[in-house]
Amino acid sequence: MRKLWKYLVLSLVLVSLALTACAGAGGGVKIGLLFPMTGPVPTYGQSSQEGAELAINQWNEAGGVLNKQIEWVLADGGCDGATATDAANKLIDQDKVKFIVGEVCSSASIPVSEVANPKKVIQISPTSTNPAVTLGKPYVFRACFLDPFQGDVVATFAREDLGATTAAVMFD
């Protein structure tokens, strides 16, 4: 998990540096961390925040990226489309972030992507699996597999490795 966050943050920082270098911007690199700190899954938000901050601190202690320190602004997306959209607009328009890590819920990442992509703000979701998060959005990325891919892999494993011929879906 730590390696994933390191690579995720490094990828975002490098892209941000490339964009800001073209504009001649100085100073640090500002990242928006948009996680569900409230709502139905605050534990995802807390662990995502801690992982991202750990990776950012490690990069900064090692001299940053291309001698630039990484700064972050935390926002609560609540795993909710409207809440996350408001938070993304604030991150972009007021906090002036050039890219966003988050949201972690597809239901929030999709509306955030509809804000970030037209404003050419890079967004990467660590865990949003719905194809609509990135479909047709060149500034939006994910660090996980899509739902359809995961479904095929699980079904193949169940049939070929476990010999299962029937299945059931359980939900709460």
Image (spheres, rainbow, N blue to C red):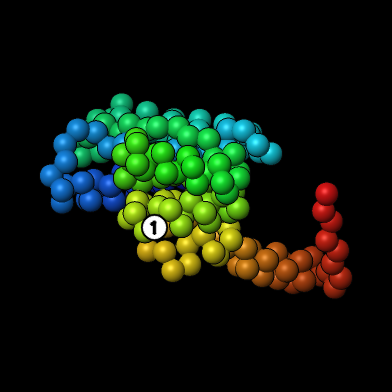
Residue 124 horizontal side relative to residue 154, left or right = left
Residue 143 horizontal side relative to residue 36, left or right = left
One can see residue 64 in this view: no
- The residue depicted at 50 percent of the width and 30 percent of the height is 50
Q: Secondary structure at mark 1?
A: loop
Where in the figure is residue 170, as x and y percent of width and height? Answer: 84, 56
- Along the line of sight, which residue is nearer the eye, 117 or 160? 117
Quarter of the image for residue 27 reads top left
Where in the figure is residue 150, as x and y percent of width and height? Answer: 63, 63
Residue 14 horizontal side relative to residue 100, left or right = left
Q: Residue furthest left?
A: 24
- The residue depicted at 58 percent of the width and 58 percent of the height is 129
- The residue depicted at 83 percent of the width and 61 percent of the height is 169
One can see residue 165 in this view: yes
Amino acid tagged 1: Asn
Where in the figure is residue 33, as x and y percent of width and height? Answer: 44, 38
Residue count near mark 1 (Cα–Cα under 10 Å), binned few <14, some 14–19, many ≥20: some
Label tally: 1
Quarter of the image for residue 68 reads top left
Name the residue beneath numbered marker 1. 117
- The residue depicted at 42 percent of the width and 44 percent of the height is 89
